[in-house]
Amino acid sequence: MTPPGALPLKLVVSGPVGAGKTTFVQTLSQTPVVATEAEASEDIGKANTTVAFDFGTLTLEGQELHLYGTPGQDRFSFMWEVLCEGALGLVLLVAGDRPQDFLPARNIFEFITSRVAVPFVVGVTRQDQPRVWAPADVALYFGLPERHVLGLNATSPEDARRVLAHLLELTLSALAPVPAASGPSPLA
Ligand SMILES: Nc1nc2c(ncn2[C@@H]2O[C@H](COP(=O)(O)OP(=O)(O)O)[C@@H](O)[C@H]2O)c(=O)[nH]1
Ligand SMILES: [Mg+2]
């Protein structure tokens, strides 16, 4: 149970068009997802795309979470910053079978993390597909420690919850009070 007075954690789901952001929020949300799709104004390979955000909520390990999925097209990059304001965690998704999206994904990742200090995980979606990059290789590409990069099938509730639980762990450990240093204080 969420302790009385505990605030919901705001988590942001970002990544390029087609990464699985809307799917991820829909898979996880325990309330109907508020989606703001519109006809795509450019050829992005599908008719509809998220122009503002997807919003869903769930409770995980007693903590209430609010999920905000961002638009993928970079003409909406101002929205990434707006949505990341006050966010306590970031899930950056990229389709593991679309290596051409890795650079745009890394650009979004760097855009956000250079502006907001936020705990994050990179989720490599479409792990159920036959030809897909392993999370460890994507970690190398992003120059990140392997523990920050997980593979998933965004349509699988178990997978999506595992990614979120991992992010929650990183987020809550970042919020935890810093333990007293055992060595001499640098200020002593
Ligand atoms: N097989 C499979 N399909 C996925 C996965 N993630 C997303 N999709 C599909 O990929 C398409 C694009 O996903 P969507 O959530 O719209 O991407 P968005 O543009 O990031 O919001 C949809 O048809 C999803 O059903 C995955 O992990 N595995
Ligand atoms: Mg979407």
Image (spheres, rainbow, N blue to C red):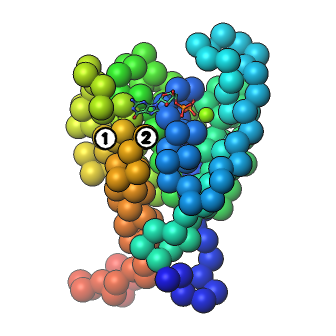
Q: Quadrant of the C terminus?
A: bottom left
Q: In which quarter of the image is ligand 2?
A: top right
Q: Please tell me which residue is depicted at 62% across the width and 77% down the height of the picture.
A: 7
The residue that disc 2 covers is 155
The numbered disc on residue 170 is none
Q: Nearer the viewer, mark 1 or mark 2?
A: 2
Cβ of mark 2 under 8 Å from ligand 1: the answer is yes
Q: Position of residue 89 (x, y in %)?
A: 51, 58
- Does residue 141 appear in this view? no
Q: Is 56 drawn above or below residue 156 in the view shown?
A: below
- Asked whether, in this view, residue 112 is left or right of residue 97, the answer is right
Q: Name the residue at the top extreme.
A: 43
The numbered disc on residue 151 is 1
Front-most of residues 164 and 31: 31
Which amino acid type is marked by label 2? Thr
Does dot 2 land on a helix, a strand or a loop? Answer: loop
Does dot 1 land on a helix, a strand or a loop? Answer: strand
Q: Please tell me which residue is depicted at 35% across the width and 22% down the height of the picture.
A: 97
- Give the CA distance from mark 1 to mark 2: 12 Å
In the rendered image, which quarter is residue 153 located in?
A: top left
Q: Where is residue 5 in the image (x, y as percent from the top left)?
A: 63, 86
Q: Residues within 10 Å of mark 1 (few under 14, many from 20)?
A: many
Q: How crowded is mark 2: few (under 14 residues within 10 Å), some or many (20 or more)?
A: some
Q: Is 109 drawn above or below residue 33 in the view shown?
A: above
Which amino acid type is marked by label 1? Gly
- Asked whether, in this view, residue 98 is left or right of residue 112, the answer is left
Front-most of residues 55 and 107: 55
